[in-house]
Amino acid sequence: MVIKGDTPLSSGLSELKNSGRYPMHMPGHKRNTQLVGSISDFYLPYDIDITEIEGFDNLHCRTGVLAQLSERCARLYGAKYAFPLVGGSTCGILSCIRAVTKPNDKIIMARNCHMSVYHAVSLCSLEAEYIYTEYCCGSGIIGSVTPRQVREAFESDPDAKALVITSPTYEGVISDIEEIAKIVHKFGALLVVDAAHGAHLSLSKNNFLPENKICCADAAVVSLHKTLPALTQTALALVFGDNADKIESSLSRQIDIFETSSPSYILLSSIEQCVNILENYGDSLFKAWKSRIDLFEENILKLENLRIFGYGEKAPDLFGDIYGFDKSKINVICDLCVCLSDGRPVRGNDIASFLRGKNIEPEMISRDYALLMTSFCDTEEAYIRLFEALSEFDADLAVDENAKNAEIERFEEFSSANKVAMKISDAEFAEGEIVFLNDAVGKISLDYITPYPPGIPLVVPGEVISGYVVDKVKKFISDGISVKNGSKVRVK
Ligand SMILES: Cc1ncc(COP(=O)(O)O)c(C=O)c1O
């Protein structure tokens, strides 16, 4: 099949590959596929692996083929500026937050932000005030940040310079970015949205999924690699709105700091390929995806016991503090009274183990659910296999009314704030000692304690470790979830 469209970067790489031009430059493998091919076990694309050489532009000063790529990306997302990134959304988040703040500024952020946001807060010596988002009843999934919460946060801290939120979340929960942006701007602050999981949602056309209106924010970051056909580490930092010119020049300086000076052209060309696919095939790919999800939803609603979060018109999860939900994220959960054949309540790990037994690898396992990520690249057959596996699992489950009360605490633990005793950046550099978690209760943590995935810290440096947090960590670990600093932690 001949792929149509405009891919000058990829064509340039393919011409280079056939040109006989000898690379007296890095990388060290010199694109010598015969040599490296004979000494490696599998194919790697050495023959097109370059970084910035004559004719291929400069990622940190884009004037040629990469400037064109940036413009195409900006057009796709309705942004004024776009920065292609090869260091993931992590690089974009660090850069965006540093671009909109000065050292010692105060920012407001949702407490369920990814650790890269905390790292930015620390690197920029910021003071963070938190918005605690509520968990959705009966699911263990965190809900949207609400405009009311944002208004209250800015009324308490009117001098905050920026708000940082995650929308969509890992699980697909979307916040009302448009309303939130109006409030943030009314207080003279800027809005940064971590939309790492929503690159597929915010495209300016072709979409059937709910909109994630990053176009109302001042800056946003999307990981192309997470939900679109682009290689791992590819992402975009996007700039919108009236302050765009000012933010763009500051963001450019920050990306110079956080982004490598030897970007991989394989990754950059994968961004180009992704954009090209969306421009030329987006409509038909999204249409086919919609019919697969619709059919999957129709089938899944017939199951007795299992639920998919947000599926079904009357999905209980979609009431309350959920503004919007991305159904391409399949969060498999069970109601409280649903048990395995041995009477145990169903945990995320049980769902994941069953799926693994069927050769289906989930994206993320939480205590209470397993998350499966889909994209328009999934085949129809993949949805059928998934449905068959879930039906089989469902058939072995049973409802136990007695389990209802015994298990109710499972979803009643949330949103409690840790006491903040020090700024993150101060705590990270403070002198302390390493202790077992059991002995850390009442002490100030100098480390992050983070279940991974999803990479949202339970404790950040400077927060006081409570008995409640220690119990929560133990539960995560007993459910098979890895927790960074979950056994020993540095404290003061
Ligand atoms: C909400 C969120 N933001 C940001 C990131 C970082 O993205 P990346 O892996 O592209 O650096 C992640 C990673 O999983 C994430 O879950």
Image (tube, rainbow, N blue to C red):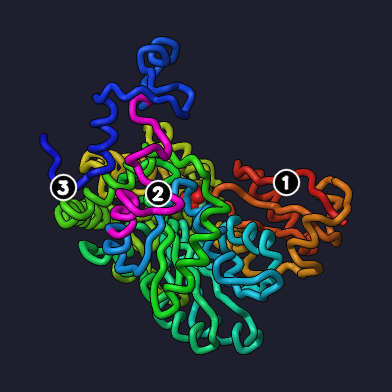
Magenta segment: does it hold 62?
Answer: yes
In the rendered image, which quarter is residue 230 located in? top left
**Tag 3: amino acid:** Gly
Q: Which residue is mark 3?
A: 5
Mark drawn on residue 485 = 1
* Residue 398 point in image, percent of width and height: 44, 50
* Residue 304 point in image, percent of width and height: 34, 54
Q: Which is nearer the N-term, disc 1 or disc 3?
A: 3
Q: Give how far apart the Cα atoms at labels 1 and 2 are.
A: 26 Å
Q: Nearer the viewer, residue 280 or 363?
A: 280
Between disc 1 and disc 3, the foreground one is 3
Badges 1 and 3: C-beta atoms under 8 Å apart?
no
Mark 2, secondary structure of its residue:
helix
Badges 2 and 3: C-beta atoms under 8 Å apart?
no
Mark drawn on residue 226 = 2
Q: Which residues are magenta?
A: 46-71
In the image, taking residue 70 as reference, residue 8 lies left or right, namely left
**Where is the C terminus found, in terms of image quarters?**
bottom right
**Where is the N terminus found, in terms of image quarters?**
top left
Q: Which is nearer the N-term, disc 1 or disc 2?
A: 2
* Residue 89 point in image, percent of width and height: 48, 54
In the image, taking residue 478 as reference, residue 46 lies left or right, namely left
Mark 3, secondary structure of its residue:
loop
